[in-house]
Amino acid sequence: MTTLVITGSTKGIGKGLAAEFARLGHRVVISGRSQQDVDATLVELGYPASQVVGLACDSVDKRQVEALWEFACEHFGTVDIWINNAGLARTVWPILDTPDAEIQQMVHTNIIGTMNGCRVAASGMKRAASQGLVLQPQKIFNMLGGGSDGEYFPGMGIYGTTKRALDYFTNALSKELKGDAILVGKVRPGMIITEGVIREAKVDKDNFERRRRFANVLCDHVETVTPYLAQQILAETKTGRKIRWLTPMKMTLRMLSGYVRSTPDKFTRYGL
């Protein structure tokens, strides 16, 4: 049985991963900025405290991240896999029009928050190893996204920059921790329909309607993707690698298929 901590797991892909790991019988610690949201998610997931627990944590505050690590260890003894999923996307503005406050939040949450999670988790894992508490491979995964490979998407200049930075950071960390037997990996989940995506679509409905057909071809629901990601995270054995759901080949095949047959609308269930 593996113990996992997933930041930003009261909604979206993080919540989906928590549900999938719990379904597979593993122990999971969820977190979000609000304890109310954490408690509501625990009720929704429906697992006993012997398997799934949660604590409010703002990953931008390193002390709160340290408290999350200690919380996990108090409940389950140690942490085998730490997933830095907490992130923020604002994709409706070009770079010059993005409000200052939104830039600050994206940079702090996506970059500083992930760095905090990595530093706390790696330090804790090294301590556990020195105390002989490690029974299985220790892993840290960072959630990437659009722009992390250097590609450009309209409206994602700031967000994509933060994810590009995380790609470099993860590569560097994987090299620095290689001698400590801590695997550091990347997860690129693809184009997932999350609460954030729905929010952005409703804010800029005209732009969404222009991209609706394209989005229906390439986007997936959370429950479609999480079983694959969870399986790959558990199975990964080599540091520095990227787990990717929507590969270039898969994107090409979907686009070609979209030209010859209609694609069911995936957004109607969200009121769009």
Image: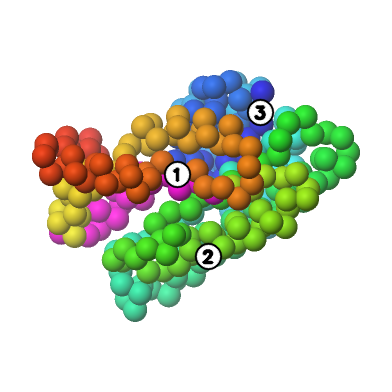
Question: In x, y percent, where is residue 229?
Answer: 48, 36
CA–CA distance between discs 3 and 2?
Answer: 29 Å
Q: Give the structural element (helix, strand or loop) at label 2.
A: helix
Residue 254 left/right relative to 144: left
Image coords of residue 7 (percent x, y): 57, 45
Q: Which residues are magenta?
A: 186-206
Q: Residue at x 59, y 37 (%)?
A: 236
Residue count near mark 3 (Cα–Cα under 10 Å), binned few <14, some 14–19, many ≥20: many
Residue at image mark 3: 2
Query: Rounded to the nearest whole Å, what is the CA distance between mark 3 and mark 1?
Result: 22 Å
Q: Residue at x 83, y 33 (%)?
A: 133
Question: Three-letter amino acid code at disc 1?
Answer: Arg
Q: Label 2, on which residue?
A: 165
**Taking 77 as reference, is 169 left or right?**
left
Q: Is residue 272 left or right of residue 174?
A: left
| Viewer-nearest of discs 1 and 2 | 1
Q: What residue is shown at x 73% (from left), y 53% (from top)?
A: 177
